[in-house]
Amino acid sequence: MTNYSKILERDQQYLWHPYSAMHSDHPIYPVSSAHGVHIKLADGRQLIDGMSSWWSAIHGYNHPVINQAICDQLQNMSHIMFGGLTHQPAADLATQLVEITPASLQTVFFVDSGSVAVEVAIKMAIQYWYARKQPEKNKLLTIRQGYHGDTFGAMSVSDPVNGMHRLFAESLSPQFFADAPRCRFDQPCLAADIAPLALQLQNHHQHIAAVILEPIVQGAGGMNFYSPDYLKQVRSLCDQYQVLLILDEIATGFGRTGQLFACQHAAIEPDILCLGKALTGGYMTLAATLSTLDISQTISNGEPGVFMHGPTFMANPLACSAALASLKILLDSPWQQRIKQIEKHLTTGLAPCKQFPQVKDVRVLGAIGVVEMHQAIDLKTLQPQFVDAGVWVRPFNRLIYLMPPYIIDTQQLNVLTHAITKIVSTLCQE
């Protein structure tokens, strides 16, 4: 039995993959290595990565600078508890994040994953109002078609009807929802777009601790790109009704939309910011929740005098070192130019899909390209076609999309977009 076959056999016997059934007949592909924008399968085939490993590996794979940073840190310590202790990678990374994020954000709470960053943000908002003697402000308001993670607090603010967590609806804390805006990225926000959220704030602000949104781009909930003007109006409404604003930039942070952070398209600042995914360049699991001094000091000065959260692997030194190296690579590079070039080639390369009747929409923003179909996609059938075309593209629901590493070149982008166009064209012939 070949190594490839052994991996598949043990995988089939023991492993449970995300959003899948045990012993599923959906194809699984063993990987032997990854370098740059290429994923090498254990059977020798090489794929161009169009997903950045779920939007995180922005510098590609096996980057020598990040590799060295982790090796150097490993000589000192791989992990140390963060209760009562600290270390230079955490202090340096917190300083860096405060410097590059909106000016009002001055405190950093490190966590293990994006979902937990959202949990922490929700707990911060609720504990903030508890410390201000307003415990009745303990609900969240968000827009439909959003996705914020798979843990219970995060699920409660993800779309309860069309999202991935419908079966848990009766077990989740009830939150307030408003219809998502229809104004696209390059359009003004009309009164009809902001009215649903404004009405919820008007009627329920006494019970709302915070509004939570994915700024500009709704990710796994539908890859929708909405107007920066909408975000500006949300900020104004939160100020008017004394409600905190949480921005979930786990998917959009670190340049993906063409700005370092998506909220910068609207020139607004949140009260709480969630970061993750690309924070370590896709190397290790690490996320962060940033807040204003008002929030951190109010919580610290109120009852019980501490913030009630503390992950075991909080501020892991290896992960912090990887993040510092990744941020240096990004900030020292012409990343804005690269994102513009990716946007240009995605726009051109995916444009032919607009002609196909089964395609509902084609949209591009920064290093994000989306082909939305009218009907849901059969992943079992489609995934092998992409692999046979030499690319790694992972569609979901009605969406075939690309979020490639920033180091991708024009030829590699052309291979990706050509594969999508060709495969979508065959779908339209069925």
Image (spheres, grey):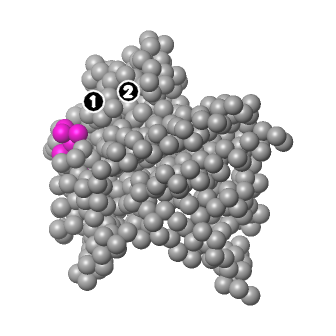
Name the residue beneath numbered marker 1: 267
Q: Does the image show residue 318?
A: no
Left or right of residue 316: residue 37: right
- In the displayed structure, 300 sits above or below 386; it is above
- In the displayed structure, 307 sits above or below 7; it is above
| x 38%, y 27%: residue | 228
| x 74%, y 88%: residue | 1
Could you classify mark 1 by the number of other residues whose Cα lies within 10 Å: few (under 14), some (14-19), or many (20 or more)?
Answer: few
- In the displayed structure, 2 sits above or below 393; it is below
Name the residue beneath numbered marker 2: 228
Could you classify mark 2 by the number of other residues whose Cα lies within 10 Å: few (under 14), some (14-19), or many (20 or more)?
Answer: many
Q: Secondary structure at mark 1?
A: loop
| x 37%, y 22%: residue | 229
For the record, the magenta segment spans 102-109
Measuring from the top left, give residue 162's x and y in whole percent: 62, 36
Magenta stretch containing residue 103, yes or no? Answer: yes
Q: Secondary structure at mark 2?
A: helix
| x 68%, y 66%: residue | 28
Magenta stretch containing residue 56, yes or no? Answer: no
Q: Which amino acid does the dot numbered 2 rest on? A: Pro
First in sequence: mark 2 vs mark 1: 2
